[in-house]
Image (tube, rainbow, N blue to C red):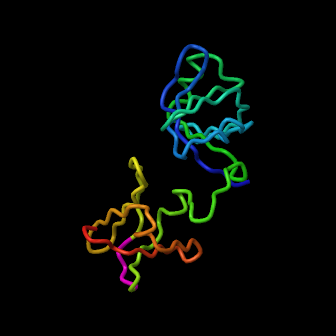
Amino acid sequence: MKLFEIGEIVKSHGLKGRMKVKSYVEISETLSSIPDILIVSRNNEPRSFKVRKVAVNRTFFFLELESINTVDAANDLVGSKVLIQEDELERLSVDEYYWRDLIGLHVVTEEGCFLGIIENIFQTGSNDVYVCNGGEREFLLPAIKDVILKVDLEKKEMVVCLLDGL
C-alpha cells in the first residue's frame, strides 16, 4: 500500500474535534469522498481513521474524524501528517503532475545545459513557479508551456526554454 501525504494538522477548530489541515494538494471535491485517512503523529505512530466530514477551502481543509470528538483529542494530533492511499488520488490529465513528482527533477535547457534541480514549488495567482537550484544560480521557472517544454519522470528530467528575464 503506497501512501500520499495530503497535509498537516495545524490546529483544532471548535470544541467537537474538528481540525484545520494545511493542504499539500490542490483541493478538489475528490477529497470529500475519501472514506479513510491515515494520521502520522509527531512520534511517528500511524493510525487509521474513518472520515466523518471534510470541508474544503483554498489552501486548507477542515477535517472531522469518527473517533475524534473533543478539542483535547484534536489538539493531540496537531503537527501530525495526513495521508491517503495513493490509489485514491485524483487521476491527472496529460501534462499535469503532482508536486512530489517534480521536486528533485534535473532541469536542462533545450541545448542540454544543466541548470539545477527543482527544490521547491509555490503557487502564484496564475501558475505554479518551480524553484531550480544547484547550478550557477537560482532560477524561478513559471509553469507555463512556453518555459516548460518537456517533463520526463522516468529520466527524472525537465527540459526548459529560458525566456528573456529568467
Residue in the foreground of this view, choosing between 78 and 29: 29
Vertical placement of 153 versus 128: above or below?
below
Q: Which residues are magenta?
A: 112-116
Vertical placement of 70 versus 8: above or below?
above
Q: Position of residue 164 (x, y in %)?
A: 26, 71
**Residue drawn 74% across and 54% down?**
1
Taken as a whole, is the magenta stretch helix, strand or loop?
strand
Q: Quadrant of the C terminus?
A: bottom left
Q: Is residue 73 left or right of residue 11?
A: right
Q: Is residue 9 left or right of residue 146?
A: right
**Residue drawn 31% across and 66% down?**
139
Q: Position of residue 91 (x, y in %)?
A: 68, 55
**Residue drawn 67% across and 50% down?**
89
- Counting the numbered discs, the total is 0
Q: Position of residue 119 (x, y in %)?
A: 40, 61
**Residue drawn 43% across and 54% down?**
127
Decide whether residue 16 is among the magenta residues: no
Residue in the foreground of this view, choosing between 93 and 71: 93
